[in-house]
Image (cartoon, grey):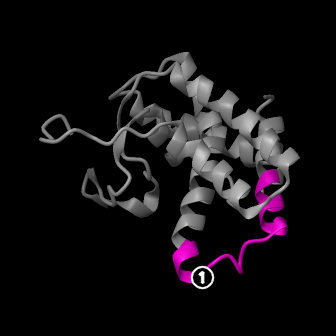
Amino acid sequence: MADYPKPLIKRGKSFYIDRYINLMKAYGYSNAKISDLADYGDKLWRSMEQLPGGFCHGDLHSGNMIKAGERFILFDFDIASHAYPVIDAATLSDRTNFNRLDDSAYDNTRRMFERFYQGYSKERVLSDCEAEAIFDFIAIRHYELNATITEYRLPLRGTSWMSDAGFDEQYEWLMRWRKMCGR
């Protein structure tokens, strides 16, 4: 991306955290739970702000790459931006389930990150802060995906599919992940 001729979009907290908080407010979801999620999001984002910025694919999972011989070809760059490169390492390491957070999710994610990092570290070494932020970004991505899914569905389906139960499910997911991570 060093040769990319145009400036990259900068994505920050407003994209990753605040969009979901604002969608819950617009829906009329529980103010107390929104406050919990906003506070957690603020804490998560403060940890990200300490990290080095740079190019970020933004959606780097196995479905957005193919292996060709000894190389990987990446595609789906629609949310590529200037953000935090550790986001891509976290996305590739994420072994949580989007709707049902399993008790083994943290350990499975840690093991996947360790496996991934064996190869990644030959190209780029992460600081201790970056490695620890992997787990914070799993939660940040959860905010981001919930906002993105909601924004894409609204023009097509309106709000009929939105419910307190749906928001509760994601609230519980995020609160459980926070507890698993010891935050």
In the displayed structure image, the side of residue 123 where residue 5 appears, left or right:
left
Q: What residue do we see at 35% from left, 43% from top? A: 81
Task: State the quadrant of the N terminus.
Answer: top left
Total numbered circles: 1
| Image spot of residue 94 (x, y percent) | 59, 48
Vertical placement of residue 30 versus 108, above or below: below
Task: State the quadrant of the C terminus.
Answer: top right
Q: What residue do we see at 68% from left, 59% from top? A: 98
Tell me which secondary structure the magenta stretch mostly adopts. helix
| Image spot of residue 144 (x, y percent) | 57, 51
Q: What residue do we see at 78% from left, 60% from top? A: 28
In the displayed structure image, the side of residue 97 where residue 53 appears, left or right:
left
Specify start and end residues of the magenta stretch as a single range. 153-171
The answer to whether one can see residue 56 in this image is: no
In the displayed structure image, the side of residue 172 where residue 18 appears, left or right:
left
The answer to whether one can see residue 118 in this image is: yes
Q: Which residue is mark 1?
A: 157
Q: Is residue 166 magenta?
A: yes
Vertical placement of residue 81 versus 136, above or below: below
| Image spot of residue 102 (x, y percent) | 80, 54
Q: What residue do we see at 63% from left, 39% from top? A: 111
| Image spot of residue 68 (x, y percent) | 25, 59
Vertical placement of residue 48 versus 28, above or below: above
At label 1, counting other C-alpha atoms closer than 10 Å, the crowd grade (few under 14, some 14-19, many 20 or more) is few
Q: Inspect the image, locate mark 1, and give the three-letter code of the amino acid beneath it.
A: Arg
Identify the element where label 1 is drawn. helix
Q: Is residue 160 magenta?
A: yes
